[in-house]
Amino acid sequence: MRELVRSRAASALLVACASIAPAACRRAGRPSAVVLISIDTLRADHLPAYGYAAVATPAIDALRRDGILFTAAYSHVPLTLPSHAALLTGLLPFENGVRDNAGFRLAAGHPTIATILKARGYATGAAVSSFVLRRDRGLDAGFDLYDDAVAGPTKERAGADTVRALTAWARGAGRRPLFLFLHLYEPHAPYAPPEPFRGAYPSSPYDGEIAAADAAVGELVRFLREEGLYDRAAIVLVSDHGEGLGQHGEDEHGVFLYREDVRVPLLLKLPGEERRGTTVEAPAGLTDVLPTIASLVGAPVPAGLHGLSLLALGERGAPDRDIYSETLYPRFALGWSDLASLENARTQYIQAPAPELYDLRSDPGETRNLAPQRPPELRRLAVRLAGMSRPFQAPSAVSAEEVRTLASLGYLSGAGAAKPGAALPDPKDHVATLRSFRALFDRHAAGDFAGAITAAREVLRESPTSFTAREMLADSLVQTGRVAEGCDALAAAVREAGPDVSPEQLAQAYDNLSVLLGRLGRTAERDRLVADASRRGVAGPEMKTDLARSRIAEGRPADAIAILSGIADPGARALVALGIALAETGRAAEAESAFQRALAREPRNAEAAFNLGTLLLRAGRAPDAAAWLGRACEWSPGDAAAWASLGLARARQGDEPGAGESWRRALAIDAREPDALFNLALWSARRGDVPGASALLQRFLALPPPPAYAAQAEQARRMLAGGRAR
């Protein structure tokens, strides 16, 4: 892969960089501040600095006058999280392991701009404006401050608020040099610019949000000037990706790799007035930012990076470059083919089921695909891309809450299903389906499950392999009370799931299907389902727990113990089931330990407290039993069986009034609770209330005779026959 940007002229490149380095070293000292500004979803061709006249951006224009403008800068992936991972690490997506917004995080250990600058004595602060870049995605490494305090239904915040958070921290950072990373979410969809920008751009809210972002940039620059940092600061302004705006059929971003999606603005202001107002036309990538900043502060560039210092681009001897981009989003979210691209100063090649090649000089809008003519450039770039090692990485499971949040931000999250060896559809052949997917996610996220059912079926007619659409159809059917239909829809999703569905997500689907089959009483199908999940290596803990509980109900506790012992990290529900099975096989001490572990995992677990109390009651430890059964009643006051058992524990302690009250509470909840009926009858007989005892015993005997109560039933009949309860 190293030959991607260095090509066969790697040794010549080293010579070229060596000849350029002395000029770079003429600047006086390292920057007093390094500032990295990322404006999300900003197309280069929507800025006046790049020739666009329909929006005013005075702050960005001022930076352009003071710095270097790169006319051909490209993102490596048109999605927020993986693009920022590439920006901060200098690694391409398949190298740092972050391939999509959902189901990925940056692993610890990768050097980042923040870790490099922190090691050079910089105070490092970041403030981000979107849930997508939240701290748990791993981008916070090396930052003294990583402010991700976003709120609201879409979990984003206004750029002005993010600037205030960052500058407030910077004012208190002391005398150390500063590294400031500012992420602005304008102009990301949904476009809703604040005033006065909404009124200034009524017909283009996207441009209105660009103007709002520019105002936030202006606030940060004002802070730098007020603190005396601007002149000696190095400032990089960039975007993570562009926006489709309807070109090539995509309204937003993520599916395609055309220039509107991957070409981004890139400005570099150096300390002093060095190279101010200049322009570089050589292709650049976001992975060039880390080597640039490292060189500015005199830090070594981490080994294995493919990026170059931006200061070396366009110089004599600098190599021709092909900039790599990819998107796996259509594959993960829609079940379509992933795409990859190489772009240089002349052409762009897009690897797709039907490959594309565009002459950027004569056709910058990429309207004429030259690939069918098979020109030499197509063959060269196809061979280069085929020679790259790009290991596939599937996403981990994504929670329902995260799916809803990402959907509110415009991202479809999930996995497309593809059978092994199946040819995936070409995204450009299914542009119209994008709007159907959008409708499905919007309706499901809004809780319009009836509308989501209609939308999901429309999507599946157009894209029948979509695992996500099947899951949403199943959930929507269940949410509208059509559990059996939902069960069948989810069974189809599981049955048709291909290799692109992550093991975690498939395990979750199996677990959910197991629960539905249990609700419907289809236990034989559930047993077959568990066997199938085990064969595929995705039997999840909930599924195993459900199966174990079925084995307990069937009188097979030893089988339940074997199943539960195979769960690596059992949750409270599994531990309770294990305790029940152990108790039924006479292993009381182990059962008590299992219940205590369940309570440690989930401190107010009423089921664990009830079973622990019952176990202790059998062992003759009435005070301890009463304490735990009391907690079970407190945590689950509608549990008639818990009140009935608490009554027995109180009776064995000699608390007759408390026992009677507990049994009456149980019968108020469930008039057919057998333990409460029988024990309250005995209690009434001891107190001389023979008619009351007789009525309770008759009600007890009228119940369907469960085998566990055979002895009590015989005693009740003897009492009634002997007149002791008449």
Image (spheres, rainbow, N blue to C red):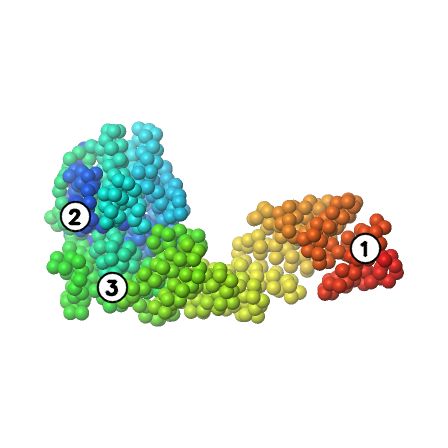
Identify the image quadrant of the C terminus: bottom right
x%, y% of residue 275?
14, 39
Residue at image point 39% right, 43% down: 151
Going by the numbered disc 3, the residue's amino acid type is Gln
Q: Position of residue 234 (x, y in %)?
A: 22, 37
In this figure, which residue is indicated by the disc labeled 2? 52
Indicate the secondary structure of the residue bearing disc 3.
Answer: strand
Q: Residue 693 carries which label?
A: 1
The relative height of residue 573 versus residue 155 in the rendered view (above or below) is below
Q: Distance between the residues labelled 3 and 2?
A: 30 Å
Residue 298, can we see it? no
Pointers 2 and 1 in contact (C-beta within 8 Å): no
Instruction: Using the rendered view, name the quadrant where residue 457 is placed.
Output: bottom left
Q: Dot 3: few (<14), some (14–19), or many (≥20) neighbours within 10 Å?
A: many
State left or right for residue 194 relative to residue 686: left
Query: Residue at left 25%, top 45%?
Result: 208
User: At label 1, which amino acid type do we have?
Assistant: Ala
The residue tagged 3 is 351
N-terminal label among 3 and 2: 2
Give SS at disc 1.
helix
Q: Position of residue 678 (x, y in %)?
A: 77, 56
Instruction: Residue at 25% x, 61% y: name it.
Output: 249
State which mark lies toward you, 3 or 1: 1
Q: What residue type is labelled 2?
A: Tyr
**From the viewer's perspective, is residue 438 above or below residue 621?**
below
Q: Residues within 10 Å of mark 2 (few under 14, many from 20)?
A: few
Q: Nearer the viewer, residue 121 or 608?
A: 608
Label 2 element class: loop
